[in-house]
Image: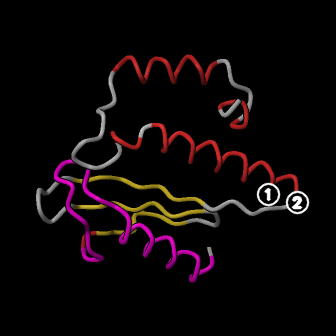
Amino acid sequence: MNYLIMKSIIEATISHYHCKECGEKISERDVSIVDSGSRGVNMEIHCSHCHDTANIKAEINVINSPLDLERISQAGAEISRMIELGKTAVGPLSAKLIQDEDILQLRNRLKQTASVEDLFN
């Protein structure tokens, strides 16, 4: 992976990540790179406030054609719409916890899905 891309991914993670347990921001000393490859980086985040640990996997996708760009724009618009709908529940302290039923629904939906694009339709 290109060093500048990896650096950007790590910096974005540090500036936007909040601990899922206590809601505190992290610093660069809280991030360890576990693995990196040609398309992504795996990081372990250790919260210095509550000592919780999280694993983050960040990947990049190369846009090969205008059609890919259109699909990405549509997916981004859908994600933005979903965030707007759930805006009152977004945030580290007020976020809705994932329930067992949510995981089972996602699992069933993934079984019926042939591609990631199908998830947004």
How far across and down, in percent of the image, does residue 79 sit?
Answer: 57, 45
- Residue 11 in magenta? yes
Residue flagged by tag 1: what amino acid is it?
Leu
Is residue 46 positioned above or below 28 on the image?
Answer: above
Is residue 100 positioned above or below 93 on the image?
Answer: above
- Based on the displayed image, in which of its 4 quarters is residue 26 positioned? bottom left
* Residues at marks 1 and 2, CA–CA distance in whole angstroms: 7 Å
Nearer to us in this view, 89 or 57: 89
Residue flagged by tag 2: what amino acid is it?
Ser
Q: Which residues are magenta?
A: 2-29
Mark 2 = which residue?
Answer: 65
* Residue occupying the far bottom of the picture: 4
Quadrant in which the C terminus is drawn: top right
Marker disc for residue 33? none
Mark 1 = which residue?
Answer: 69
- Quick check: marks 1 and 2 in contact, CB under 8 Å? yes
